[in-house]
Image (spheres, helix red, strand yellow):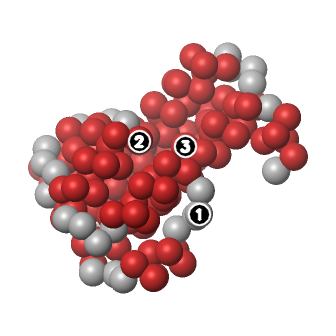
Amino acid sequence: MHLARIDYSVGKFIKELVDFYNLNVVLRGKLWGVSQELINELTIHSGNVFATAVKIYSESPTRILEEIASVFPPVDQLIKVAGSSDLRLLVQYLGPFSYRFAKDLEDSMISLFTEFSPGAALAAVHFKFVESELVITLLNAFLEGVPRDFIAKLYGQVI
C-alpha cells in the first residue's frame, strides 16, 4: 500500500471500494439477521460505512440507512434505483447497482484527478471489469430464458 500513501487518488479509490464492500456486508447481514460479532469479522475495519454501521448495527434498518447515507452518498442513489428503502429490495439491487457505482466512481475519479492519475486508471479498469460481468450476466439471463421484463426491471435503471 506504499503507492496509496504517495498518490492520494489511489487511496481515494480504495476508500470508496471498501465503503461499498462494507455496505454490502451490513445490508445483507441486517437482512439475514447476522450478529454484530459476525459483521465485525466480515467487514473491513476502515472507512465511513464501517465506522457508522458498527455503532448502530443493532438499530432499525431505516436508521442504519439514514446514517450510512449521510457518510456514503451512493446509498441515496441505491435507494432511488431500487425505488424503495425496503431492505430486501436494496439487497436485491446491490449486484446490478455495482455497475452504476463503478461507472460513477470512474467519472468522479477522472474529474477529481484527471484520467492520468493512478487512482483514475484503477477506477477505469474496475469499471471495465464490472461492465464485462454485467454483459455476461445479461447474456446468461437471455440464454436461460429469463423474462425480459424481469431483466429490464432489475437492470434497466442501472444501465
Whether residue 29 is situated above or below residue 94 in the rendered picture: below
- What SS does tag 1 mark? loop
The three-letter code of the residue at mark 2 reads Phe
User: Mark 1, residues whose alpha carbon is within 10 Å: few (<14), some, or many (≥20)?
Assistant: some
Compute the Cα span from label 2 to label 1: 16 Å
Give residue 137's position: percent from left, percent from top: 39, 56
* Labels 2 and 3: the sequence-earlier one: 3
Q: CA distance from mark 2 to mark 3?
A: 9 Å
Where residue 127 sits, quadrant-wise, is: top right
Left-right relation of 40 to 91 = right
Position of 99 compared to 150: left or right? right
- Reading the image, the residue beneath label 1 is 45
Residue 105 in the figure: left or right of residue 1: left
Q: Amino acid at mark 1?
A: His
Q: Amino acid type of disc 3?
A: Glu
Residue closest to the eye, 15 or 132 = 15
Circle 2 — which element?
Answer: loop
Q: Nearer the viewer, mark 2 or mark 3?
A: 2
Residue 131 got which mark?
none
Compared across the picture, whether 130 is left or right of 53 comes to right
**Residue at the location (28% across, 66% down)?**
144
Q: Residue placed at 18% from the left, 56% from the top? A: 62
N-terminal-most mark, 2 or 1: 1
Question: What residue is pinned by disc 3?
Answer: 16
Please state which of the two labelled residues, at mark 1 or mark 3, is closer to the viewer. 1
The residue carrying mark 2 is 72
- Is label 1 in contact with label 3 (beta carbons under 8 Å)? no
